[in-house]
Image: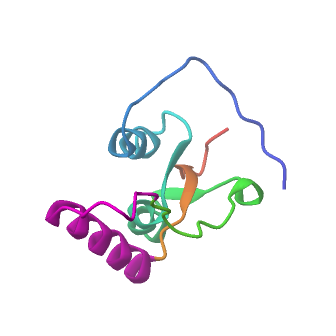
Amino acid sequence: MRAAVFNEGQLVVNGVDEALNAARAGMGLGFVPEDLARPYVAKGELKRVLDDWCAPFPGFHLYYPSRHHASPAFGLLVDALRYRAVSTGSTPVPVRAHRENSR
């Protein structure tokens, strides 16, 4: 299915929350983690687009020196990333506002 996309300006944001809110407001596409967009997609407020351009997210990769003692904070970060990867299977996906009369 082909669709025309009309761009009347440019919006640049520095965070996924802002990108998600802009997409929800109908300002354009937002490339956000799937677990953040999922509730809005389920409600029909957002629609997943550009599926062919979304590679699966295999997970986080951390590189650090094994000879150094890891701080407790670093250990908590690793545990949190492992928990998130297992519990959500998060994949970044582009979304846009779903409107019946959108161009």
Q: Residue 45 at x, y = what percent?
A: 45, 57
Q: Residue 77 at x, y = what percent?
A: 26, 64
Q: As rendered, which of 22 and 59 lies closer to the eye?
A: 59
Split into 4 quadrants, where in the image is the C terminus? top right
Residue at 42 percent across and 67 percent down: it is 35
What residue range appears in magenta? 63-88
Single out the residue that lies furthest toward the front: 67
Q: Residue 15 at x, y = what percent?
A: 36, 39
Single out the residue that lies furthest toward the top: 9
Question: Quick check: 33 left or right of 9?
Answer: left
Split into 4 quadrants, where in the image is the N terminus? bottom right
Residue at 39 percent across and 45 percent down: it is 16
Against 87, residue 68 (above or below) is: above
Q: Residue 91 at x, y = what percent?
A: 54, 65
Residue at 46 percent across and 71 percent down: it is 42
Question: Quick check: 34 left or right of 14?
Answer: right
**Secondary structure mostly taken by the magenta-highlighted segment of the chain:** helix
Q: As rendered, which of 38 and 27 lies closer to the eye?
A: 38
Against 52, residue 28 (above or below) is: above
Single out the residue that lies furthest toward the bottom: 86
In which image quadrant can residue 48 be found?
bottom right
Q: Is residue 86 magenta?
A: yes
Against 11, residue 56 (above or below) is: below
Residue at 24 percent across and 63 percent down: it is 70
